[in-house]
Amino acid sequence: MPHSSTVEPLGTLVALGGGDDDALLALLCDLLPTPDVPVEIITVASRDDTRSARAYERALRELGCTSARHLRISEHHPADSPDTLRRLRKAGLVFFSGGDQERITDFLHGTEFLRVLLERYQQEAGFVIAGTSAGAAVMPELMVVEGYGWRALRKGGMLTSTGLGLLPRLLIDQHFVERGRFGRLAHALLAHPMCLGIGLAEETGIIIRQGRHAEVFGDGVVMVVDGRQLSGINLGRIGRGEPVSGQNFRVHLLVAGQHLDLHSREVPAPTGE
């Protein structure tokens, strides 16, 4: 399991809830200091990784990122190959596409690749890690990997697993509004009440600087669910298939331009208020 440092990281994370990612790609290009900074596109979450990678390469290059390339990691392309690690060490941006987030962790957990990724994120101010959909959900210590509809509100109907460990005490869920995922995120927080839950609508995301300062971008809503004051959690008293219960969730709805302090879990008032 990756270990998250208590020292504030110097790198930047960008997470999108899925859907049309043109705005995300334009934002990422704007974050780079020069157009020729190496951008590595990782599509391991998708089984049709070549087609997806070509689309992202083309889109990023059309936006001016001249050094965007597919960094292939798969059954036949190990994450710890010398060439892959060399490219990771030179990259200014590493982008994870959508698909199945468990494929990302299956191929990266326990690797030198993940160690280098975490180290660069912690130590390099210009380094950017971005992801959409599964590529966003995989960033924290924990990720929700199962939970659908009403079943997500019954014991056993939600499942979490270990993410990449870039963000401690955080859960990010994607396609949040469109796929009705509040129930599974709430259940996840009943199981892990010290975590902060962030639900990203499609075409909506957050930029996280120094592991703490989050800013919303995009056209939709980010739902923030804080479980630190939860009471009445019944998970330890019920059997599998029974409905879950808990009180005192704290919820924020945030839109583009609003900020969230991931440590204090407070939403700063807009400047001038």
Image (cartoon, rainbow, N blue to C red):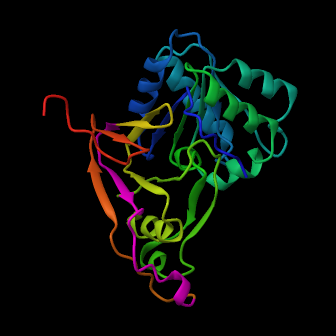
Give the quarter of the image for residue 216: top left
- Provide the residue span drawn in magenta: 216-239
Looking at the image, residue 82 sits to the left or right of residue 57; the answer is right
Residue 236 drawn at (x, y percent): 55, 84
Q: Is residue 263 above or below residue 7?
A: below
- Count numbered badges in the picture: 0
Residue 272 drawn at (x, y percent): 13, 28
Residue 236: say if magenta.
Answer: yes
Looking at the image, residue 174 sits to the left or right of residue 249; the answer is right
* Residue at left offset 45%, top offset 55%: 196
Residue 227: say if magenta.
Answer: yes
**Residue 40 shows in this picture:** no
Quarter of the image with the C terminus in it: top left
Give the quarter of the image for residue 268: top left
Q: Is residue 196 above or below residue 209?
A: below
* Residue at left offset 57%, top offset 88%: 240
* Residue at left offset 81%, top offset 36%: 112
**Residue 24 shows in this picture:** yes
Q: Nearer the viewer, residue 150 or 89?
A: 89
Residue 245 drawn at (x, y percent): 41, 81
* Residue at left offset 42%, top offset 78%: 150
Residue 59 drawn at (x, y percent): 50, 25
Of all residues, the one furthest to the left in this rendering is 273
